[in-house]
Amino acid sequence: MLFSEVVETSAVVAATRSRLAKVAALAELVRRMTTSAVVSFLVGAPSQGRIGAGWRTVFDLAVPPAASPSLTVSDVDAALGAIASTSGKGSTARRTALLTDLFSRATEAEQDFLRRLLTGELRQGALEGVMLDAIARAADVPGEVVRRAFMLSGSLPETAVAAMTGEEALAAFRLEVGRPVRPMLASPAESLPDALAELGACVVEHKLDGARIQVHRSGDEVRIFTRTLREITGTVPELVALVRGLPCRSVVLDGETLALNDDGKPRPFQETMSRFGAQDVRELLLSPFFFDCLHVDGVDLLDEPLRVRLDALRAVAGSHVIPGVVAPTDDLAAEVLTESLDAGHEGVMVKALESVYAAGRRGRAWQKVKPVHTLDLVVLGVEWGSGRRKGLLSNLHLGARDPDGGPPIMVGKTFKGMTDELLAWQTRELMAIATEKSDWAVMVRPELVIEIELDGAQVSTRYPGGVALRFARVLRYRPDKDAGEADTIDTVRALLPRRAAVPDDTIG
């Protein structure tokens, strides 16, 4: 398959607002693909990951484009593999030479696609849901079967290859101890009473202000992953030792970890996250709290109801189970919420006891209750500060994710809630991913996720989504999330007063 076909399909998808049209275009290409790299390229995530060539290197290449398409998808995939494997003395020059050769064989449109692919500007992760629908359509198999296979494989290209083989190949995916599973996600609840009324028989648990982890143990071998399926085993030896000591032979647990003060209250989220990127063990210890058990001693529990998984969890994790109450009265559920907030946590999770473990789209079987509105948004740009903030990047441009795979949709700005330390860090980090610079502002690659506290949303003609944030304040950056996990424009619109409405054609 010619690489130009991927580039053309990407352009078609970017040019339409119709989810059905996006799915149709992607499905047509997936149906004809000869290598899984087609899927990798279309979702902006080549299988090689980072190839070792920086943003400046890629954009400084001045190579005359080819007159006509000749590159195949396999050619490009092989070239990226060769670049990624280049290391040692003189590797920078060799990578540049390989990139130059690749770009010399690419047309102008292909060069533009490659630049955006290699610098993370192809809406990385944002097309995941659309691509899953396209794979299901291309293979003529149920969407739920495809989503389950993706949950278990963690790989869109691998899922696509299996789907095109047949439904039996998708059904063959099983939970494999040591291979991370896509995490189940929660939806925001209007209130605790609303969540209790909607879900019926449920468990109400503390919602910790920590980092999501998934732990796998087989015998003495332990592996620990983040919510984005990145392995962090080597940086958290205290968690490895704890899991190795649990009363079982094999287990897969879902949970949170956080650093605690001497009084048992959580330390700042950034301190917990600092451990995940550490090269050396630090003195700051992490404490795990588990809320789900997906496998124990050879038995997979994904399809068992939560009440069964909780029994297994309590048997294996003991005192490390997250605090909560099963089937509480309304008054007792309210007490759990108060206890969680008093302990310095975010609120509570309310989960239906009959729910199975399902990843992918945020469902209603798990709901999160917080006393304030928060959103995870993408930083699109930032304006230079004035006065005391002169010389620092201050006023953030914030975007919500387009659930249909388009670029993030701007929903507001804020300069509130930032400490001097955060302003200095933000200036360094955002300048490193800048795409456009002026005396007024800096536009950046849409990849950093930031958690914003707000009082609600209002209808607005100022922004393309037809909605704007009210009194937005920065809480923290979320290095544990990528842009594909940011909240969608639909989530922002759900915060509008019930009488307010946003026309469907506001996204331009």
Image (spheres, rainbow, N blue to C red):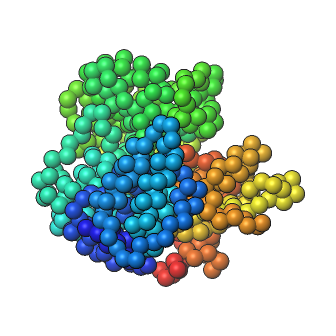
Residue at (33% x, 40% y) in the render? 180
Any part of residue 134 in sight: no
Residue sitting farthest toward the right: 387
Q: In this view, does 338 lie to the left or right of 146?
A: right
Which residue is located at x 80 percent, y 59 percent? 385
Seen from the viewer's position, the closer of residues 393 and 374 is 393
Residue nearer the viewer, 230 or 490:
230
Which of 13 and 19 lies nearest the eye of the viewer?
13
Q: Which residue is drawn at 47% across and 48% down?
A: 94
- Left or right relative to 313: residue 459: right
Q: Is residue 42 visible?
A: yes
Task: Tell me where residue 29 sits by quadrant.
Answer: bottom left
Q: Which residue is painted at 42% across and 49% down in the image?
A: 83
508 or 246: nearer the viewer: 508
Labels in figure, total: 0
The x and y percentages for residue 224 are: 40, 32
393 with respect to 153 (left or right): right
Q: Percent from the top left, x then y, of residue 387?
A: 88, 57
Q: In this view, does 18 lie to the left or right of 343?
A: left
Location of residue 310 (image quadrant): top left
Quadrant of the drawing holding the N terminus: bottom left
Give the x, y percent position of residue 288.
Answer: 47, 28
**Residue 97: x %, y % from top left:** 47, 54
